[in-house]
Image (cartoon, grey):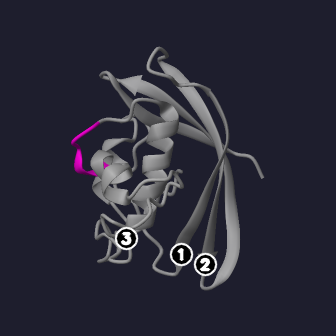
Amino acid sequence: MSRRTTRPARPAAGVRTPAVTGESPCPCGLPAGYAQCCGRLHAGTVAASSCESLMRSRYAAFVVRDEAYLLRTWHPDTRPPAVDFDPAMRWVRLEVLETTEGSPFHTAGTVTFRAHYTDNGRPGSLHEKSRFVRHEGAWVYATAVFVD
């Protein structure tokens, strides 16, 4: 997900949304609690083993508003200076539609997904094909193409 901005960060940027706790279901959609799933990646105790794992953890980082993780997992050539979290937007569900390559044995891969949200209570979705590459041994988000 490539939400970037040239506006200054809002005061809430980088602050985790209290609605997600370690025991909460992980926002990425996998059947584990946040602390045992994407929370470990956000904390830096484990690294993403595949581009799909990184995609899911980045989606969860948007949900919990973890700016540091998003910037850390963004390729330095395309990384913005900050992530601007819209306070009216709530990410509600992730659908991973297709993954190509991106395993521990690859150096690049793509993930096509649909991320559902509400913006001021109105439902919407973001349909994107994201490209991930290995940078200094770790998976990072490189670029995206919006599908619709």
Please state if 117 lies on the left or on the right of 32 as rendered: right
Comparing 20 with 88, the one in front is: 20
Q: CA distance from mark 1 to mark 3?
A: 15 Å
Q: Which mark is residue 81?
A: none
Q: Amino acid at mark 3?
A: Val
Residue, disc 2: 119
Residue, disc 3: 20
Comparing 94 with 11, the one in front is: 94
Comparing 146 with 111, the one in front is: 111
Examine the image and state in which quarter residue 83 appears. Answer: bottom left
Please state if 88 lies on the left or on the right of 82 as rendered: right
Q: Which residues are magenta?
A: 42-46
Please state the horizontal and vertical placement of residue 110, each as a whole percent of the image. Answer: 60, 31
Residue, disc 1: 89
Asked whether the beta carbons under mark 1 and mark 2 sit within 8 Å of each other, the answer is yes
Point 62% across, 76% down: residue: 118
Please state the horizontal and vertical placement of residue 66, each as a whole percent of the image. Answer: 33, 60
Please state the horizontal and vertical placement of residue 145, each as a whole percent of the image. Answer: 66, 42
Point 39% across, 41% down: residue: 74
Q: Amino acid at mark 1?
A: Met
Q: Amino acid at mark 2?
A: Asp
Asked whether the beta carbons under mark 3 and mark 2 sit within 8 Å of each other, the answer is no
Q: Does the segment drawn in magenta span residue 30? A: no
How many C-alpha atoms fall within 10 Å of the one at disc 1: few (<14), some, or many (≥20)? some
Comparing 120 with 9, the one in front is: 120
User: Helix, strand or loop at disc 1?
Assistant: strand
Helix, strand or loop: magenta stretch: loop
